Amino acid sequence: MLVSVVLAGCGAGGTDAADVRVTGKFGERPVVQPQGEQPKKPQVDMVSTGSGRVVKQGEIVIADIEIRVWKGNREYLSTYSGAGHPNSVIMDGTHVSRTWDQALVGKKIGSRVVLSSPASEGFGPSHLPPSGTTQKDALIVVFDILGSYNPDVAADGKKTKDASEQDTSLPTVSVDSSGIPRIKFPDGPAVKSATARTLLEGEGRKVTAGDTVIVQFIHQEWKAENPDQTSYQPHAPRAFDLDGEGVPESWKKFVVGASVGSRLVIAEPGNPSNADDPGGAFVIDIVDVVRKADQK
């Protein structure tokens, strides 16, 4: 069923309400049409209410997001198409505006929420309009809340029987006192083809092609001592559409079929024709899966 709602919320003073028409299904890109004058103060409106649990303060929210500039209804950002993936919203006051806290905390997972705000209060934490906008602009931010997680959520599966076996061609994985996985590479060269091992076997449902996976992950180049990509700095699980652009082929091969709660180590070969690509390894904790069929 399509949802077509005209939203007329109230600003802090109750006199600056602005109208926005939002049409479309949760989980699909919304059609947004601003009506009349843009807001002078931030306002939050509900398009539809989900059936999941309530988002708590301090959690990381995973959401699809559409941001449009009120004047001209110009697209500013969208995670619904192209190479976009659902965003991790880190509500600590240093990554996004506190108005996002107001829009998301206390709402149920599965909800579609709209924040209409002057640009200086609708995006970044610095009270400055984001790049490409001015102090005179206003933003419309549509959130589809897909999930909400503790920042340090991790795989909770059982240790597999072969997890302690030493395959000298694969990196080993330990866990430090903070619970963060650490990768150590063998003395030999990188693997010749992508190879994976399950370290922890989860008991959740299996990932299928086309799912959105919620993960904690680390990537480290072969022989490097520290990661070059990580979701642990800051602690924030990330979301990836497995059929989206930019997802490594090894993820599509090995994450698909794995169970929620699992921890995988995936070793990848380097590129013989590119000295800047020595190969590397991922450690991936599969903490949840969002399935398109669940959103209908």
Image (cartoon, grey):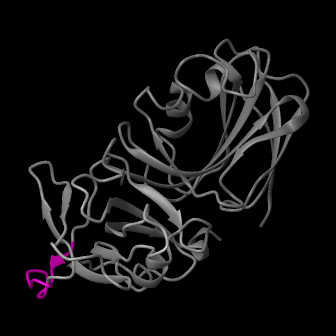
Q: Is residue 291 above or below residue 192?
A: above
Q: Is residue 234 above or below residue 275?
A: above
Q: Is residue 262 visible?
A: no
Image position of 209 with respect to 78: above or below:
below
Q: Is residue 71 left or right of residue 112?
A: right
| Residue 213 image offset from top left, x and y in percent | 46, 68
Rendered-image quadrant of the C terminus: bottom right
- The answer to whether residue 196 is visible is yes
Say whether residue 238 is left or right of residue 294: left
Q: What residue is drawn where x is 43% and y is 61%?
A: 276
Secondary structure, magenta segment, majority class: loop
Residue pictured at 20% horizontal, 59% vertical: 181
Left or right of 219 in this view: 39: right
Q: Residue at x 65, y 62 (%)?
A: 27
Q: Position of residue 18 (x, y in %)?
A: 80, 26
Nearest the eye: 242 or 279: 279
| Quadrant into which the N terminus falls | bottom right
Please state which of residues 123 and 227 is positioned toward the viewer in this rendering: 227
The answer to if 163 sits in the magenta stretch is: yes
Q: Quadrant of residue 293?
A: bottom right
| Foreground pick, 120 / 56 | 120
Please provide percent x and percent y for residue 137. 79, 21
Q: Which residues are magenta?
A: 157-167
Is residue 217 found inside the magenta-colored segment of the image? no
| Closer to us: 22 or 5 | 22
Residue at image point 11% right, 88% down: 161
